[in-house]
Amino acid sequence: MTILREPAAAPVLRTERIDTLDAVRGAAVLGILLANVVAMSGFPFLPRDHYRSLGLAEWHEPSLFLVLFLIEAKFYSLFSLLFGVGFAVFIQRTAARGANPARLFKRRLLGLLMIGLVHTLLIWMGDILTTYAVIGFALVPFIKRDDRSVLRWATAMLLLPIALYAVMFVAAKAASAQPAVGVGSGELPQFLVDAAAGFATGGYADVVKGNAIFTVAQVVRRFLLMFFPRVFGMFLLGFWIGRRQMFANVDAHRALLTRVFAWGAILGLPLAFVGARMEGNNMGTPNVAGLIETTVKTIGVPVLSLGYAAGLCLLVQRSRVIRRAFAPAGQMALTNYLLQSVAAVVVFYGVGFGLFGRVPLVVALVGAVVFFVMQMIASRVWLSRAAFGPAEWLWRMFTYRRAVPLFH
């Protein structure tokens, strides 16, 4: 009986899509590109004196600060929130069609994990998909939890980094640990410097080797920065929001969204500013400045991300032009995310045009915006003929284990 019920599950139809959710997801993909292009272009891997020789030197530090202030972590946090919203939508629609939502979601995560591994090892080392896939399995037990339990767990996970850092700070102080130089110094271990040099001037084998090295280093870094509980907390918060169908019915939640947007600006922006000014203090041996930075970011990042989400919801609901512009890019978010990495490798790495470390950061950021506008146009044209983006299509066929028509 169970086997016969499985074919009831099928990919979401275009008429069932939530345009507001797609549009906000499209904006999040732009934010992620702006955050990623800093590393893609080589900026963190070379001395700042090197960039001062490229021209536009007066724009380097302001550009980096604006990324740290308004973009870094905030759009990954927003994307994590949207992942949780998507989880709620997936569970609701799969259950309504008589299929097993937990089983299908696990298969969906397995497909995402495989895509992420290909991405992080063969294309670009800054992948987020593998993290989302692994942490996503922890969502399954919450399918049957009530809203209050989900919200409590979300709050606990989001605040956990403060408690963990405080414990480490007390332990370090009790052990009389001496302050250590952290990532904020701008220094990298030699093996990472060598790997980055492979990106700049090496062949494809050097890229793959460097990707493997940085992938492991990223796991360690994200662990030290307590990135994983923050992601899971936003997953759960998004799941709670998705259950309440805020994106599907913005008008019914307009008053709440307006308040969230206001508090995101009033509280989130000042905290994000302080966090950007203190960048790097929470690396190395735990210290007072690191505890302050961790506290500020732990509160400020999700608050500002929620403000972004609420503001974007209100904006795209109000403006049909903006909604139609961003929704196709969000509907093809996975494809566009992967294409951004491919384009960056071609433009910046030695296997391509070799512009790694040769482009002023402000130029790289402007170029990223231009590239995303091209993606918005291409997404709209592609979806005028196809039902899904190419990567989304493959992902859906793996999830449902059936042929899914790509073109109309």
Image (cartoon, rainbow, N blue to C red):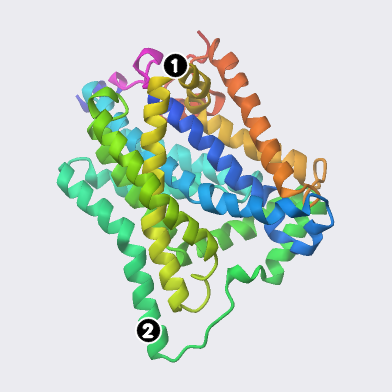
Callout 1 crowding tier (Cα within 10 Å): few <14, some 14–19, many ≥20: few
In three-dimensional space, the C-alpha distance between marks 2 and 1, rounded to whole angstroms, equals 54 Å
Mark 1 and mark 2 in contact (Cβ < 8 Å)?
no
**393 shown above or below 293:** above
Rendered position, 229 above or below 294: above
Residue 13 is inside the magenta segment: yes
Residue 93 appearing in the image: yes
In the rendered structure, which segment of residues is drawn in magenta? Answer: 7-18
Q: Which residue is mark 2?
A: 171
Asked if the magenta segment contains residue 92, the reply would be no
Report helix, strand or loop for mark 2: helix
The dot on residue 320 is 1
| Residue 85 image label | none
- Residue 136 visible, this orientation: no
Q: Measuring 41% from the left and 45% from the top, which residue is drawn there? A: 305
Q: Earlier in the sequence, mark 2 or mark 1?
A: 2
How far across and how far down the image is residue 35, in percent? 58, 47
